[in-house]
Amino acid sequence: MIRVISAALLVVAAAFGVAHAQTSQTLAQVKSRGSLNCGANTGLIGFGAPDAQGNWSGLDVEYCRAIAAAIFNDPGKVTFVPLSAKDRFRVLLAGEVDVLVRNSTWTISNDTPPGLLFVGVNYYDGQGLMVRRKLGVMSVMQLAGASICVQRGTTTELNLVDYFRTNNLKHTVVAFDNGPDTLKAYDAGRCDAFTTDASSLYAERLKLTAPDDHMILVEIISKEPLGPLTRDDDPQWFKLVRWVHFAMLNAEELGVTRANVDQMRGSSNPEIRRLLGVDGKFGEGLGLTNDWAYRIVKNVGNYGESFERTVGSRSVLRMSRGQNALWTKGGLQYAPPIR
């Protein structure tokens, strides 16, 4: 009896999903506009930054392109909107962007304001500190009395105050309204240390006048799960963005890459066949074609490919997968199955 009821519920849910997908206002607007408006960083190497010609690259940028690929079969149909940490949520809530993919930390204070929904975690991070080598500091615990540059109005600032208070370390906060000004002040010697997400520290160090004169301390002082956000007034759009993330993770776990995705459509593995739209109609509930995940992998790649290309071994940052490895390899990245 349980199996019969479950099957019936699946039929009803599938029917409801198709109908509801047709009423997704955000998806309809994106299709009508012909491009995705994606809230991006103002310039963070490895995650979201334009080059001199205005070409964007980074892990977050590739998520925006993956969404566009799922919808249009064209990863180029994205308009990147640079947003500061101060303005990012306001702009999303105002409807000026369709999705925010801008290294934002999933916390209760960021998650509970009316109108916002975190989609998932595309990068597990933690906050770190950078100092000048000449200070001779090897640990955060040696920074008692130090002045520290930080961006105002961020979880970074709150974490800094909490950590130093907990460890009875006196310090002076030197806060600025945006990231570039914060880094510029540190580079000019206005403070002893600079703090932000550890992943960002590797990128920001490259922008300093003499990068090799600075070092990143080993301690991580917070949990920083970073991920995309949507508005909470369109649940179907939220699900679409979330399953783009899950599709990239599942593709990596199943060994489906940009290079072999066409060949994999002939696989006998039922999970791969469902992922690539050969079997089943799993795109309908999202308001997409059934080959939506195939489009993502074909045009952008799986999660591992994006990671290595933007922040990992094939990038200038050369960061290890660490916690961002798949769950099958000791990491935290895990996706529900397409079934």
Image (cartoon, rainbow, N blue to C red):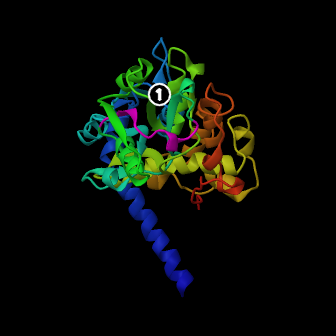
Query: Residue 113's spot in the image, x, y percent?
Result: 26, 52
Q: Is residue 180 above or below residue 243?
A: above
Task: Please give left or right for residue 35 compared with residue 251 in the image.
Answer: left
Query: Residue 252's spot in the image, x, y percent?
Result: 67, 46
Query: Which residue of the protein is positioned furthest toward the top in this rendering?
Result: 53
Nearer the observer, 285 or 173? 173
Query: Residue 165's spot in the image, x, y percent?
Result: 37, 50
Q: Which amino acid does label 1 sit on?
A: Leu
Nearer the observer, 260 or 64? 64
Residue 214, quarter of picture: top right
Task: Please give left or right for residue 253 compared with residue 218 in the image.
Answer: right
Whether residue 66 is visible? no
Q: In this view, does 206 lie above or below 285?
A: above
Where disc 1 sits, the SS reads loop
Give the labeled residue for mark 1: 44
Which residue is at a point 57% across and 26% down the rendered structure image?
133
Quadrant of the snapshot with the N terminus: bottom right
Q: Give the range drawn in magenta.
A: 138-152
Whether residue 17 is visible? yes
Quadrant of the snapshot with the C terminus: bottom right
